[in-house]
């Protein structure tokens, strides 16, 4: 694939010297990088293999939503990790990946407030002006009841300046937020290094050492939220990756899934 900064991605990733990223596939176009990674996992692809596409035509986000991206604009990457991981910890890997994306984006957006929005989005800004910068989709291939491989798919908006009408009011990009040094090869190298730092630790031991960083980056903490399970004040994320919400009656519930919206700023 000539003429794209992604041509340099394999060398940039390898230069970080991580376990992840020793094999990097760069494609001009893919239907879904996650589908490619999952198929390769079933065929025995090694730990740390990475797939990057310059354009994606049939990607998907959480709850089956479409995630398409025109050529040359964004970062579309899937990482295959063969790490010991109980199935119950898969939600924690989405949070770990969100932190990795958040840290990577913050490096090119030093003047912007980049946060993690439970369960698997990265946003810029705070209520009521936050906009989605990236999404994460973690999928697993199973061997019986055991997780055989984990595929972490990430879509990070980098160069896009014009979004489709249906998402124009809620989406943003590094370019629109005044990002500097927007080289996708270097950004993906930083991202793979960030995943390498946290992913295996969280898979093996839970949130542990990343919890303090997650709390600082948590968009919802202390805010009034509304979801399928009700409404209340978000009080953080528990050890199982669930959102802890205190209702107006004082009861505490733990949400494990579902769409969550910010309702209004907390008065506290």
Image: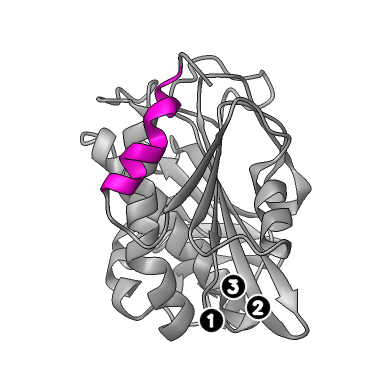
Would you say 260 lies left or right of 206 here?
right
Residue under the image location 67 percent in, 46 percent down: 61
Query: For mark 3, what is the residue?
Result: 90
Quadrant of the snapshot with the C terminus:
bottom left
Q: Are marks 1 and 3 in contact (CB under 8 Å)?
A: no
Would you say 39 lies left or right of 109 here?
right
Image location of residue 71, percent across then percent down:
58, 19
Displayed quadrant of residue 235: bottom left
Q: Main secondary structure of the magenta part?
A: helix
Residue under the image location 42 percent in, 53 percent down: 22
**Label 1 – label 3 distance at C-alpha:** 11 Å
Query: For mark 1, what is the residue?
Result: 84
Mark sitting earlier along the chain (2/1): 1
| Closest to the observer, 74 or 257 | 74
Query: For mark 2, what is the residue?
Result: 147
**Label 3 – label 2 distance at C-alpha:** 9 Å
- Per the rendered image, the range of residues in magenta is 4-15
């Amino acid at each position: 694939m000539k003429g794209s900064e992604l041509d340099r991605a394999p060398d940039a990733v390898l230069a970080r010297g991580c376990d992840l990223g020793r094999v990097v596939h760069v494609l001009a176009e893919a239907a879904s990088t996650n589908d490619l990674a999952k198929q390769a996992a079933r065929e025995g692809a090694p730990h740390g293999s990475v797939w990057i596409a310059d354009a994606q035509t049939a990607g998907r986000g959480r709850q089956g939503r479409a995630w398409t991206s025109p050529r040359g604009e964004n970062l579309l990457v899937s990482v295959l990790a063969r790490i010991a991981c109980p199935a119950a910890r898969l939600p924690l890997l989405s949070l770990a990946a969100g932190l990795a994306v958040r840290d990577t984006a913050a490096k090119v957006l030093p003047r912007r407030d980049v946060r993690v929005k439970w369960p698997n989005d990265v946003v810029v800004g705070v209520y009521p002006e936050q906009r989605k910068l990236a999404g994460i989709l973690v999928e697993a291939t199973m061997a019986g009841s055991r997780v055989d491989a984990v595929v972490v798919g990430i879509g990070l908006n980098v160069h896009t300046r014009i979004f489709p009408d249906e998402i124009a009011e809620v989406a943003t990009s590094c370019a629109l937020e005044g990002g500097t040094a927007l080289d996708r090869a270097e950004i993906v190298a930083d991202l793979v290094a960030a995943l390498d730092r946290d992913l295996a630790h969280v898979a093996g031991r839970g949130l542990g050492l990343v919890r303090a960083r997650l709390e600082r980056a948590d968009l919802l903490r202390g805010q009034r939220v509304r979801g399928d399970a009700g409404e209340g004040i978000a009080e953080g994320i528990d050890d199982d990756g669930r959102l802890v919400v205190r209702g107006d009656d004082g009861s505490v519930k733990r949400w494990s899934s579902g769409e969550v919206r910010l309702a209004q700023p907390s008065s506290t």
